[in-house]
Image: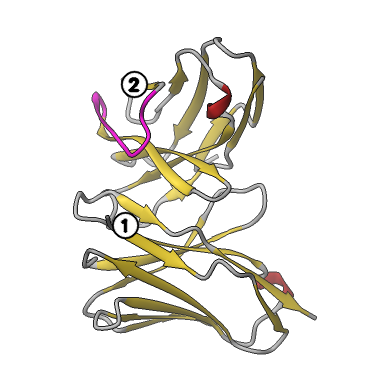
Amino acid sequence: DAGITQSPRYKITETGRQVTLMCHQTWSHSYMFWYRQDLGHGLRLIYYSAAADITDKGEVPDGYVVSRSKTENFPLTLESATRSQTSVYFCASSETGSNTEAFFGQGTRLTVV
Amino acid sequence: SQKIEQNSEALNIQEGKTATLTCNYTNYSPAYLQWYRQDPGRGPVFLLLIRENEKEKRKERLKVTFDTTLKQSLFHITASQPADSATYLCASAGNNRKLIWGLGTSLAVNP
């Protein structure tokens, strides 16, 4: 099916563990984004990618790692999860960056205990 | 710092009325603004994009305006329906070309 999919939808992990959130899009959009959404903060950009093998930091990158070896995949890794990383994570893609509409995945609710 | 502000208070209106949501931006001049809808437990869904030279844009029952003098965008839903109940987000690119998001305004349309 065409679209953007995230997995898993829900994840509970322990403090200190490494966890990877997956994001896959079928449109071949150049740009992909990772956001976190928390009450009182709205959507905050973690990392984005303008093309395969090109990534850049967003507003809140600390504690996260991304890679983009293929255009369609943009995984987000929490190297050593902390409770402050408990959040809802959204992946998004767009054709040409911030001046065109973004398509969002359904989100991953991550709880770090 | 560059900021987008939306009404934090939830908006409650009666079915059939026009809902008007506000988005104000400060400390930058965006070339365009985007509006999204977000339902609980789901990702935002794009609704409209308006450029600074367009002043007004329409799509079915939706209308967006862009006033660069007031540094404001208004989002209208005419003939509102209970199905329009959701949170509406405003976003635009800052000077570093990364999207800045408002916190969203929750709209409840009562039957």
Q: Is residue B95 above or below residue B87?
A: above
| Rendering coords of residue A27 (x, y %) | 39, 42
Check the image and name the residue furthest to the right.
B111
The quarter of the picture where residue B33 lies is bottom left
Amino acid type of the residue tagged 1 in the rendering = Thr
Query: Looking at the image, is mark 1 or mark 2 earlier in the sequence?
Result: 2
On the rendered image, what quadrant is the C terminus of chain A found in?
top right
Q: Nearer the viewer, residue B106 or B2?
A: B2
In the image: residue A11, left or right of residue A33: right
Q: Is residue A2 above or below residue A82?
A: below
| Rendering coords of residue A75 (x, y %) | 43, 24
Mark 1 sits on what residue? Answer: A100
| Rendering coords of residue B85 (x, y %) | 67, 69
Disc 1: CA contacts within 10 A as few (<14), some (14-19) or many (>=20): some
Q: Main secondary structure of the magenta part?
A: loop
Q: CA distance from mark 1 to mark 2?
A: 23 Å
Tally the marks: 2
* Residue positioned 42% across, 65% down in the render: B5
Check the image and name the residue furthest to the front.
B1
Amino acid type of the residue tagged 2 in the rendering = Ser
Q: Nearer the viewer, residue A77 or A60?
A: A60
* Residue positioned 29% across, 66% down in the render: B26
User: Is residue A39 one of those drawn in magenta?
Assistant: no
Mark 2 sits on what residue? Answer: A67
Q: Is residue A2 above or below residue A52?
A: below
* Magenta residues, start to end: A52-62
* Residue positioned 29% across, 84% down in the render: B55
Q: Chain of mark 1?
A: A
